[in-house]
């Protein structure tokens, strides 16, 4: 089983957390996010870029009501330098972790990680309490591949939630949230185990997750469970967003 390379993982991210609209303007892949967050709003380069290309992308993004935002992936240091020279600030460095689904799968007690789609009201409530509102739920709704929302429980009470979707042999985890009072109780681990079980049942061999580099507890958990960094990215946001 061949491990997916970074390009394959980024393709899976796009498929399982899609923007409201894709806009292709060479050399850019622009995204209209409709309030769904940075990942569905950031522009990415599809070939080499010069300064005038950046100005054109800025115009396009402002025309759809978005502050210019670019995703910088590993190997794009030239683009990163051009944006830095224009005053763009680094935002939210992200690590992409991956492991074979069978390494994370585990038999679980009944009702410890409950799958559903569409999400239950309690799942939407848990997401809302963590700042994941209707615009991000709309991102999940747009996914056209197999998908589930997992509900984690602790002491017979709802305690965590996660969205999982497939792109071929890769299952991507998004929006994993655990209630503050049940953290470090194993809820997140059981949700991840349940995600891997579901991925295997759908024929996916790999499971991946994006995590901000600043989220030390989540990074530690993923490494403890055998998920390893395979790629990364950060955003560059226009100076106007910080004023």
Image (spheres, rainbow, N blue to C red):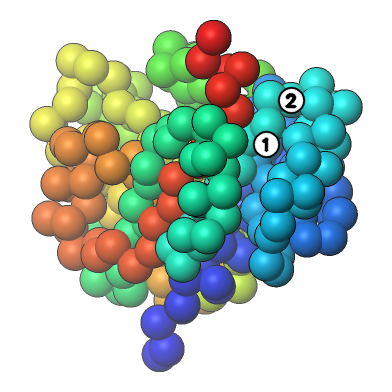
Q: Is residue 129 visible?
A: yes
Q: In terms of secondary structure, where does tag 2 sit? A: loop
Res 112 → quadrant: top left
Residue 43: x, y in percent?
68, 46
Looking at the image, residue 193 lies above or below residue 126: below
Comparing labels 1 and 2, the label whose residue is closer to the camera: 2
Q: Nearer the viewer, residue 130 or 162?
A: 130
Q: Nearer the viewer, residue 226 or 80?
A: 80
Q: In terms of secondary structure, where does tag 1 sit? A: loop
Residue 185: x, y in percent?
12, 31
Report if the CB atoms under discs 1 and 2 are less than 8 Å apart. yes
Looking at the image, residue 20 lies above or below residue 223: above
Please report whichever mark, 1 or 2, sits nearer to the chain's N-terminal start.
1
Q: From the viewer's perspective, tell me whether residue 159 is left or right of residue 10.
A: left
Residue 15: x, y in percent?
66, 57
Name the residue rendered at 25%, 35% in the picture: 215
Q: Is residue 118 visible?
A: no
Task: Measure the alpha-carbon separation of dots 1 and 2.
Answer: 8 Å
Kindly identify which residue carries mark 1: 41
Name the residue rendered at 43%, 36% in the picture: 90
Quadrant holding the N terminus: bottom left
Kindly identify which residue carries mark 2: 66
Res 21 → quadrant: top right
């Amino acid at each position: 089983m061949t491990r997916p390379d970074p390009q394959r993982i980024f393709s899976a991210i796009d498929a399982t957390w899609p923007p409201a609209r894709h806009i292709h303007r060479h050399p850019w892949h622009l995204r209209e996010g409709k309030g769904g967050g940075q990942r569905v709003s950031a522009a990415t380069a599809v070939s080499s870029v010069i300064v005038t290309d950046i100005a054109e992308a800025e115009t396009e993004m402002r025309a759809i009501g978005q502050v210019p935002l670019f995703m910088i992936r590993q190997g794009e240091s030239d683009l990163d330098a051009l944006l830095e020279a224009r005053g763009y600030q680094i935002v939210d460095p992200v690590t992409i972790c991956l492991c074979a689904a069978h390494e994370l799968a585990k038999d679980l007690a009944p009702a410890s990680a409950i799958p559903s789609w569409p999400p239950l009201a309690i799942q939407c409530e848990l997401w809302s309490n963590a700042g994941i509102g209707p615009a991000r739920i709309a991102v999940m709704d747009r996914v056209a591949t197999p998908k589930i929302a997992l509900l984690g429980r602790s002491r017979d009470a709802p305690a965590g939630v996660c969205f999982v979707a497939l792109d071929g042999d890769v299952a991507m985890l998004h929006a994993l949230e655990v209630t503050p009072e049940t953290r470090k109780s194993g809820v997140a681990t059981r949700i991840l185990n349940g995600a891997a079980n579901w991925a295997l049942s759908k024929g996916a061999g790999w499971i991946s997750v994006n995590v901000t580099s600043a989220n030390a507890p989540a990074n530690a958990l993923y490494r403890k469970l055998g998920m390893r960094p395979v790629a990364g990215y950060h955003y560059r946001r226009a100076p106007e967003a910080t004023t």
